[in-house]
Amino acid sequence: QVQLVESGGGLVQPGGSLRLSCAASGYILDYYAIGWFRQAPGKEREGVVCLTSSDGSTYNSDSVKGRFTISVDNAKKTMFLQMNSLKPEDTAVYYCAATNNPWGSECGTHHYHYWGQGTQVTVSS
């Protein structure tokens, strides 16, 4: 069972950038799909960006297309979420996750089995 630990969250002004990291205890691309999710206060957890390891295809939610990018350094057992042009509505706790369920490619939270503890991102002036 992989252990995942997020870092890099914090306070950023609207329009700014932030890069989140997720350190894994094993090789992250050994899993069928990996991804980043977020949960804002009073809202359900939602998929933001997910990657299918076998072919590198990605799913991006409409709300972050063109702004957020997922990447992986498999040798360092780390995946990243680069967030640009941040908006106040991006404020949430961000989680990284991994799964061997093929439905994980669709970035649904219920298809993911391994989760980090989350890191807070606040976008505010």
Image (spheres, helix red, strand yellow):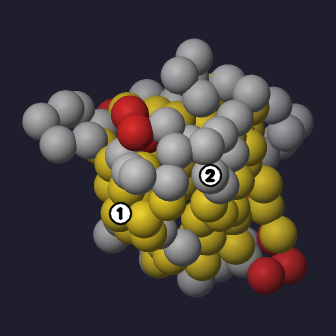
Residue shown at the point (70%, 73%) measured from the top left? 78
Residue nearer the viewer, 34 or 9 = 9
Residue 50 shows in this picture: no
Q: Nearer the viewer, mark 2 or mark 1?
A: 2
Going from N to C along the chain, the mark reached first, 2 or 1, is: 2
- The residue where tag 1 is placed is 120
Give the spatial CA distance, label 2 vs label 1.
15 Å
Do the CB atoms of the residues marked 2 and 1 lie less than 8 Å apart?
A: no
* 109 relative to 26, above or below: above
Position of 46 relative to 86 (above/below): above
SS for callout 2? loop
Q: Is residue 20 above or below residue 26?
A: above
Crowd band around label 1 with a 10 angstrom C-alpha radius: few (<14), some (14–19), many (20+): some
Residue at the image point whose x is 17% and y is 43% from the top = 41
Residue 118: give x, y in percent of width and height. 36, 65
Residue of label 2: 16
